Image: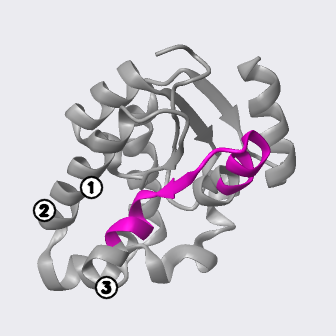
């Protein structure tokens, strides 16, 4: 597959803006957009927190892996994956070899400002203190180290982020 044919996968910590940026990027590139969490929610007919609660994280992660791996080899899609998807080594390996992987990078200080907006829909944050969230944030940084493009989202709006992605992809 050529660079122009490859699908683009956006990764990064929960709440970084992957879905928002992916939708806008898909519009600008005139490509189909797929949000993995939304696809899983449709299949189970319930939101992710409910899937975690009712079926457990393992069932969710198994379905996430199947879906991402099946989509990674498709052409010219914009795919937003959950913040924990790259915890699975086989997902990471397939995505890095078949897609362009873009890491949306945010500082913890900027991410903290988003907690109130995202906490209800992020089951892995439920019941955690700010110290535990910070620990999770920094632990997850290691899974994002493998990517093709690193884009800082600190103090940028989605339009600016997408313009930077498009510029850097050229």
Residue 40's disc is none
Query: Is 85 positioned to the left or the right of 115 in the image?
Result: left
Residue under the point 76% across and 46% down: 154
Question: Quadrant of the rendered structure where residue 45 is?
Answer: bottom left
Q: Does residue 32 belong to the magenta stretch?
A: yes
Looking at the rendered image, the disc whose residue lies closer to the viewer, 3 or 2, is 3
* Cα gap from disc 3 to disc 2, whole angstroms: 18 Å
Q: Residues within 10 Å of mark 2 (few under 14, many from 20)?
A: few
Query: Is 30 positioned to the left or the right of 52 in the image?
Result: right
Residues in magenta, as a range? 23-40
Which is more toward the observer, 9 or 34?
Answer: 34
Q: Work out whether residue 127 can be spotted.
A: no
* Cα gap from disc 1 to disc 2, whole angstroms: 10 Å
Tell me where residue 84 appears, x and y as whole percent. Answer: 35, 51
Looking at the rendered image, the disc whose residue lies closer to the viewer, 1 or 2, is 1
* Cα gap from disc 1 to disc 3, whole angstroms: 15 Å
Residue under the point 79% across and 44% down: 28
First in sequence, mark 1 or 2: give its number: 2
Residue 58's disc is 2
First in sequence, mark 3 or 2: give its number: 3
């Amino acid at each position: 597959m050529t660079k122009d044919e490859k699908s683009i996968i956006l990764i990064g910590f929960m709440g970084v803006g992957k879905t928002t940026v992916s939708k806008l990027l898909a519009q600008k590139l005139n490509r189909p957009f797929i949000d993995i969490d939304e696809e899983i929610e449709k299949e189970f007919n319930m939101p992710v927190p409910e899937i975690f609660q009712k079926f457990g994280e393992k069932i969710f992660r198994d379905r996430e892996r199947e879906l991402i791996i099946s989509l990674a080899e498709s052409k010219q899609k914009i795919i937003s994956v959950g913040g924990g998807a790259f915890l699975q080594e086989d997902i990471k390996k397939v995505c890095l070899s078949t897609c362009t992987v873009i890491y949306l990078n945010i500082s913890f200080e900027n991410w903290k400002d988003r907690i109130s907006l995202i906490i209800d829909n992020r089951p892995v944050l439920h019941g955690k203190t700010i110290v535990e969230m910070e620990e999770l944030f920094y632990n997850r940084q290691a899974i994002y180290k493998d990517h093709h493009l690193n884009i800082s989202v600190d103090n940028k709006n989605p339009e600016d982020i997408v313009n930077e992605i498009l510029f850097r992809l050229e």
